Image (cartoon, grey):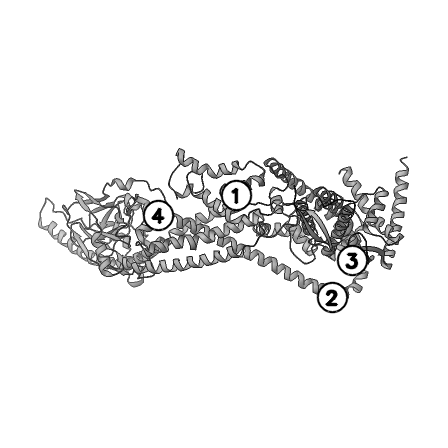
């Protein structure tokens, strides 16, 4: 039983079965595609339609009640499908190449754009391709030899990237095969949820349960507890563990792939047989062909080079005479041509630039999305409940998620060659993204307000139980929480492991200064930001930071805690250890691990931490190294300065102001703890000598003090510069991360 | 290099010449052209004939007129233009030359 419809075909009424009508329509559509670049396309199609109409009439006159599939197929067989024409065209091209003088007419036609490429659209020429047909397409467009374009692409450095971009964005000339083009549709007849899987199944000609199973693997594995279970565990986001990845992909495909509603769409959905085997075969064939084509091209170029040499001579001889005659005509023609060529080159260039920009935006977006997803679980430590949380969700979904999904959608549509332009979808994407921008901006301002004020600075002296030790080693408290492994390494809070509502952040800085007395001193400054100064002061009072001395060990907390109720507001602890001259200090290398976390929302002087206490400047030092405090600074046990500065630098700058002996002479020989020892022989002469010695010493000391003072002030200046640099580094610490991500994404995209 | 390809190239080379020759005899309708060629055992697809005719027409070698038909839409009958006649003569000369040459060469093998 078949439905019969009446169509008006070339001015006559034709009763035709519905499926036959779809067949006919497809056939004519395929011809339309095939002759897309023909000058007389409409005329040709019209002629063919007339002929078909005539044949229909013949059949109807012969007594058929309507046109059936068989009739249409017989007619199509007589007329020939585009694939059959193609064979003929191939013959054309080859005769072009092999024929000698006889191709004059052909090439004339060629330049007139008689059979294709008449300044309409740039296509990839898939009939003469070596890789993707980009070069031969451009060559055909300009009517020049593809070899020239290929050489240009090879010679220019950007060739590869340009080629890839053009390959993606320039449509192929040969988008149809055998008249029926296969498209990816959702199959409404075999659907369980959206028909995506059954559509994919019929596209690849496999049982729909195969794609279904692939989509289900993540969920099945959840029940069998394969792999991790963290729902947004980033590295496994798309892997075969429980992840929303496959769900999201399903939703995107559902949005992107049109449903096959009409018979013709259903036919297109099934199309010709493309089973996995034939894909494999066609890939293998393609690979082999690339090799053959490259070889052939090499041969071709060689031959042509020889020919060119010979022809150049002829050309010069023959054309020399004609030249004068033709020059007038050529000039007129080429001025038009030249204009066209320039516009087209400009167009190609613009395509390329736009492509590059698009690629960069896509990569950046994916990087941002990955970072944002990674940071998102931490929002509770920063954002207050209510509006800020809602805004954060809005930002994640609309500002970051929507463009990512939009781009994925675009790419899939390109690859699946979905033709339906969905305006509604485009507008809703834009609208949602604007909503996302609004969320993002409000979030930033709202959070920025919470960081606006800084706490009052109170230095707190911590009494040491035994401040007179000769050397002090600063070690962290043993805290089991520090040893926990963060489940996600991108996040700043996770370095010391976080529980759900408490995070340890390494915002502890240990400064080393010179003690004015002869005993160790420890002082602590706690700092925080907040919505108001009072709020910040409250947060400061909540910071717990412990210090305990145990003989020569000074135990300090390595991290401070932040919890989800009080929030993270740049809490920061600065512990200052004042080391007396001649005493030793070592800070355990464990203090060097862990991230300092600080957010800055254009609110205050970024360096306020470092200007709070500039009476006694601190020294640079390395973790895990033992130092000795000298009058002029901190020295390693080898006698090098802690900041690693070489003495020449000091000398030179000292010399600018006053002539002083090289500083290292004194620094190296003089020891503050070298008090004149009282000898067992206490005769007056020795006393006298000692007195003189002391006098010399004090002179030396005074001199040295002066030098030190100079050096210290210079050191101070340098330290400040260093700190600023460190600060800058810290600020840009996220950038390497991002670059890594960008690199990853880049390879990912290239892989696509 | 296979026989099909070479044979079809040979056929294609003479296609325009044959079509022009048929039209030269008198006004012709495309399906007549196909029939004549079929009867001479030179098979081409109808779908390739239409573009060829259109190209020849656009090159001003052919012209056509509409003729009402009692079976379906009006038909296009093609005829040769003056330019087309001249083109045909050139082709014919080339063909005779070529056929003679081929005959001379291949005849030696017989």
Disc 1 to disc 2: CB gap under 8 Å: no
Nearer the observer, disc 1 or disc 4? 1
x then y, percent, for residue A694: 15, 54
For disc 2, the marked residue is: A332
Q: On the same chain: label 1 and label 2?
A: yes
Nearer the observer, disc 4 or disc 2? 4
Under tag 3, what secondary structure? helix
Q: Residue at x 45, y 39 (%)?
A: A239
Under tag 4, what secondary structure? helix
Q: On the same chain: label 3 and label 1?
A: no
Asked if residue A403 shows in the view, the reply is yes
Q: Classify mark 1: residues with Cα within 10 Å, few (<14), some (14-19) or many (20+).
A: many
Q: Residue at x 83, y 49 (%)?
A: B33
Asked if residue A649 shows in the view, the reply is no
Under tag 1, what secondary structure? helix
Q: Classify mark 4: residues with Cα within 10 Å, few (<14), some (14-19) or many (20+).
A: few
Q: Is residue B32 left or right of residue A351?
A: right
x then y, percent, for residue A285: 64, 38
Nearer the observer, disc 3 or disc 2? 3
Please state the chain letter of the residue tagged with numbered disc 2 in the rendered image. A
Nearer the observer, disc 1 or disc 2? 1
Please state the chain letter of the residue tagged with numbered disc 1 in the rendered image. A
- Specify the label residue B58 is tagged with: 3
For disc 4, the marked residue is: A377
For disc 1, the marked residue is: A196
- Specify the label residue B56 is tagged with: none
Q: Residue at x 9, y 50 (%)?
A: A684
The residue closer to the viewer here, A312 or A91, is A91
């Amino acid at each position: 039983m078949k439905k019969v419809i009446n169509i008006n075909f070339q001015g006559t009424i034709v009763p035709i079965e519905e499926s036959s009508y779809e067949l006919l329509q497809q056939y004519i559509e395929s011809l339309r595609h095939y002759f897309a670049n023909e000058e007389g396309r409409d005329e040709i199609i019209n002629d063919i339609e007339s002929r078909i109409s005539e044949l229909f009439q013949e059949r109807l006159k012969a007594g058929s009640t309507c046109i059936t599939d068989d009739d249409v197929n017989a007619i199509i067989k007589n007329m020939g499908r585009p694939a059959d024409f193609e064979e003929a065209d191939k013959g054309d091209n080859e005769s072009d190449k092999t024929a000698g003088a006889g191709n004059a007419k052909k090439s004339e036609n060629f330049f007139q754009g008689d059979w294709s490429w008449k300044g309409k659209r740039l296509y990839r020429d898939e009939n003469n391709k070596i890789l993707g047909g980009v070069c031969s397409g451009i060559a055909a467009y300009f009517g020049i030899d593809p070899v020239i374009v290929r050489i240009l692409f090879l010679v220019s450095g950007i060739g590869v990237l340009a080629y890839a971009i053009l390959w993606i964005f320039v449509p192929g000339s040969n988008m149809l095969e055998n008249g029926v083009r296969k498209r990816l549709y959702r199959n409404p007849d075999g659907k369980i949820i959206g028909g995506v899987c059954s559509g994919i199944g019929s596209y690849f000609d496999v049982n729909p349960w195969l794609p279904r199973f692939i989509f289900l693997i993540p969920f099945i594995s959840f029940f069998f507890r394969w792999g991790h279970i963290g729902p947004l565990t980033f590295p496994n986001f798309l892997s075969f563990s429980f992840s929303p990845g496959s769900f999201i992909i399903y939703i995107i495909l559902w949005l992107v792939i049109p449903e096959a509603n009409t018979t013709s769409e259903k036919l297109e959905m099934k199309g010709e047989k493309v089973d996995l085997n034939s894909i494999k075969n066609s890939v293998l064939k393609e690979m082999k062909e690339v090799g053959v084509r490259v070889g052939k091209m090499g041969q071709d170029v060689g031959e042509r080079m020889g020919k060119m040499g010979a022809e150049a001579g002829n050309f010069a001889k023959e054309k020399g005479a004609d030249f004068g005659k033709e020059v007038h005509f050529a000039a007129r023609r080429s001025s038009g041509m030249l204009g066209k060529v320039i516009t087209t080159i400009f167009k190609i260039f613009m395509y390329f630039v736009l492509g590059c920009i698009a690629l960069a935006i896509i990569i950046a977006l994916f990087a941002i999305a990955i970072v944002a997803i990674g940071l998102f679980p931490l929002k509770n430590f920063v954002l207050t409940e209510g509006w800020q949380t809602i805004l954060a969700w809005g930002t994640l979904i609309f500002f970051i998620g929507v463009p990512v999904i939009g781009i994925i959608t675009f790419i899939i549509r390109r690859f699946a060659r979905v033709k339906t332009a969905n305006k509604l979808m485009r507008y809703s994407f834009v609208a949602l993204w604007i909503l996302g921008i609004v969320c993002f901006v409000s979030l930033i301002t709202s959070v920025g307000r919470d960081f606006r004020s800084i706490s009052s600075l109170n230095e707190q002296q911590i009494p040491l139980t035994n401040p007179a030790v000769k050397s002090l080693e600063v070690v962290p408290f043993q805290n089991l929480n520090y040893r926990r492994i963060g489940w996600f390494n991108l996040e700043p809070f996770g370095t010391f492991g976080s529980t759900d509502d408490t995070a340890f952040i390494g915002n502890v800085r240990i400064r080393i200064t010179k003690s004015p007395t002869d005993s160790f001193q420890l002082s602590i400054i706690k700092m925080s930001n907040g919505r108001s100064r009072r709020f910040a002061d409250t947060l400061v009072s909540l910071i717990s930071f412990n210090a305990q001395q145990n003989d020569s060990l000074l135990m300090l907390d390595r991290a401070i805690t932040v919890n989800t109720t009080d929030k993270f507001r740049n809490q920061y602890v600065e512990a200052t250890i004042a080391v007396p001259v001649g005493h030793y200090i070592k800070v355990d290398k464990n203090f060097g691990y862990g991230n300092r976390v600080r957010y800055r929302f254009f609110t205050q002087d970024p360096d306020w931490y470092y200007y709070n206490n500039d009476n006694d400047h601190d020294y640079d030092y390395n973790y895990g190294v033992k130092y000795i405090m000298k009058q002029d600074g901190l020295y390693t046990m080898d006698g090098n300065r802690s900041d690693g500065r070489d003495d020449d630098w000091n000398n030179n700058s000292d010399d600018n102001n006053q002539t002083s002996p090289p500083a290292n002479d004194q620094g190296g020989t003089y020891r503050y703890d070298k008090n004149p020892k009282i000898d067992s022989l206490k005769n007056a002469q020795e006393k006298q000598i000692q007195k003189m010695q002391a006098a010399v010493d004090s002179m030396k000391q005074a001199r040295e003090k002066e030098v030190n003072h100079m050096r210290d002030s210079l050191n101070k200046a340098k330290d400040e510069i260093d700190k600023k640099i460190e600060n800058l580094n810290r600020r840009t610490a996220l950038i390497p991360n991002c670059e890594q991500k960008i690199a990853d994404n880049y390879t990912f995209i290239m892989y696509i | 290099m296979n026989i099909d390809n070479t044979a079809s190239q040979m056929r294609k080379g003479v296609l325009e010449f044959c079509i022009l020759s048929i039209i030269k005899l008198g006004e012709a309708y495309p399906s007549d052209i196909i029939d004549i060629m079929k009867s001479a055992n030179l098979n081409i697809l109808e779908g390739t004939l239409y573009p060829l005719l259109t190209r020849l027409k656009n090159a001003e070698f052919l012209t056509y007129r509409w003729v009402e038909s009692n079976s379906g839409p009006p038909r296009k009958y093609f005829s040769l233009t003056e330019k087309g006649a001249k083109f045909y003569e050139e082709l014919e000369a080339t063909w005779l030359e070529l056929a003679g040459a081929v005959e001379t060469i291949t005849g030696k093998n017989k």
